[in-house]
Amino acid sequence: MFRAIVLFFVVSSSLVAQTVIDVWPEGKMPGAGAKEAETEVKRQDGFLRITNVSKPTLTFFKAERPDGSAAPALIVCPGGGYGYCVMDKEGSEIAAWLNKNGISALVLKYRTPNNREGAFQDVQRALSLVRANAVEWKIDPKRLGVIGFSAGGNLAAKASAPVVQRSYLAVDVIDQTGCQPDFGILVYPAYLDDKSGQVASDLKLTADMPATLIIHSEDDKRHIIGSKVVHEALKRAKIAHEFKLYATGGHGYGLRCERDAKVWPEDALKWLKSIGVSQ
């Protein structure tokens, strides 16, 4: 059984009830958790950063469709350098935008800090968990994608790679359900390249990857190289993808960019329509 809690979020000045779902059954999570209690990382900008995550969760923001049909959905992976998860700017705000456009969203609070192995297990489990509950949650299991920001973009890229072997031993029947997304959106992704300017060794790019959209700006000097080398690798492998490269935008803006990259949400929606995910 999974613990589900109804919480209330302020989204676009309205109070919205949503459900928080444990990613793992009690006592069945593989790998390690954090050494300290979960806590908020305080910064002057006021955004919600959560670290020391030992109980990964999905917060389900359901898109209400007029005809009651199953909606496409995206698992949202916030950024935070794998040190924390930015749960609002790159989480609940993204979910509200997706809901407005008829897409359900599930914001993943994955294991931190510095637990890439645990975070990868969490996103794979989350994909299986959503598909296993697709009928009950009115989600189309064949239109389930992943969108990630910064470190979350790295996580989304790794989740999109074909699964030769799941990153953990199955804990229950849910793990018999597929854990590869049907499409992926990488927004200013981080850590995609190694120090020599090649694709990072932990990122497996093959022809079986799903359709992918990469979003980045030229002035994100620290991470733009990774997006460029992945774009070239995907092009060589003839993997369906699109690379939206803007002149300015920087890094870490979510939906709040005021420079050239501010059009990325509209471009992403056009891309989703082009691959048959949304209307």
Image (cartoon, grey):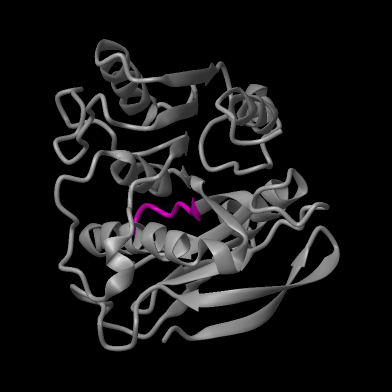
Position above or below: 161 against 29: above
Relative depth, front residue between 92 and 196:
92
Residue 66 x %, y %: 83, 52
As drawn, 249 above or below 167: above
Q: Is 136 positioned to the left or the right of 222 in the image? A: right
Position in image of residue 7 (x %, y %): 67, 80
Nearest the camera: 266 or 71? Answer: 71
Q: Main secondary structure of the magenta part?
A: loop
79 magenta-colored: yes
> Seen in the image, is 56 located left or right of residue 18?
left
Which residue occupies 33% across, 78% down?
Answer: 54
Whether residue 48 is visible to the viewer of this picture, yes or no, is no
Q: Residue at x 58, y 22 (%)?
A: 248
Q: Which residues are magenta?
A: 76-83
Answer yes or no: is residue 88 visible. Answer: yes
Image quarter (top left, top right, bottom left or bottom right) of the N terminus? bottom left
Q: Say if the magenta span includes residue 53.
A: no
Q: Position of residue 154 (x, y in %)?
A: 34, 43
Q: Position of residue 233 (x, y in %)?
A: 26, 18
* Residue visible at 25% across and 24% down in the picture: 207
Identify the residue at horizontal 50%, vertical 76% (top origin): 21
Front one among 117 and 177: 177
